Amino acid sequence: MSVTLSHHFLARRLHSLSGVIPIGAFLLEHLYTNFHAVAGPAAFNEAVKGIQDMLPGPLLPLAELFLIGLPIAFHAIYGVYIAYTAKSNVLSYGYARNWNYLLQRVTGIILLLFITAHVLTMRFGVGGLGLAVAHHPDQAFTIVQYWLAQPLIMAFYVLGIFSAAFHLANGLWTFAIVWGITVSTRSQQAFSYACAVFGVAVFAIGVRAAFAFVP
């Protein structure tokens, strides 16, 4: 039993850590790249091309696999396990925390669907124009614009951005508790306000970037 508990403890720590590094860090970088669309198609295409120039040849797909793909897969699979096995009042403090706990699980499921669709269409060019942003950086803006110009797709993206912003912000709050950064009730309360502001900022930046693609 002690071995099982120790493995579970380690997995929970790795799950918490992976949500911040590298997944959270990648989300912020992705938003930064997307926000270049506000300056126009040329600026966005150049930002996409800049990433490929920084990681030429096989370095980009290897980085995507080991630094993004596998961490997201682990975080998602173990997150589903936690949601299935945990009690609803774990890490909850009062009525608001219960709602946040529930929303963390709901947004996690939404993100699993959203990321899958996003990767298939944007990264691998499934459907639509049949073009992948990674393979056609000079047409990156046009490819994204094709999808986001459709109202239902845009609505799905806004939902995905909200889910990502909330999941990361609330995840940061629990991360600070799990790793012993915020120990007292006062520090946890203060950090919850900071995480809320951070989440709103991430959502606003993401939505502003998304609507920059709309004609």
Image (tube, rainbow, N blue to C red):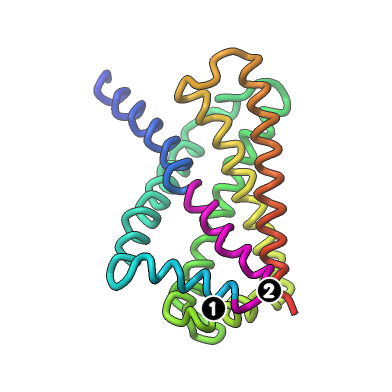
Residue 63 located within the stretch drawn in magenta:
no
Residue 39 located within the stretch drawn in magenta:
yes
- Tell me the magenta residue range: 24-42
**Residue 55 relative to residue 50: left or right:** left
- Residue 213's tag is 2
Kindly identify the residue that appears in the image at 35 percent across and 34 percent down. Answer: 11
Q: For label 1, count other residues whose C-alpha is less than 10 Å away and answer few (under 14), some (14-19) or many (20+).
A: many
- Residue on which the image places disc 1: 140
Kindly identify the residue that appears in the image at 66 percent across and 40 percent down. Answer: 198
**Residue 208 relative to residue 54: left or right:** right
Question: Eyeballing the image, is 96 above or below 200?
Answer: above
Q: Secondary structure at mark 1?
A: helix
Kindly identify the residue that appears in the image at 75 percent across and 80 percent down. Answer: 215
- Tell me whether circle 1 and circle 2 mark residues in contact (CB < 8 Å): no
Residue 85 point in image, percent of width and height: 47, 34
Residue 84 point in image, percent of width and height: 49, 38
Direction left: furthest residue: 3
Count of marks, rendered view:
2
Q: Quadrant of residue 63?
A: bottom left
Q: CA distance from mark 1 to mark 2?
A: 11 Å
- Residue 203's tag is none
> 180 or 8: which is nearer to us?
180
Kindly identify the residue that appears in the image at 60 percent across and 82 percent down. Answer: 142
Q: Secondary structure at mark 2?
A: loop
Q: Amino acid at mark 2?
A: Phe
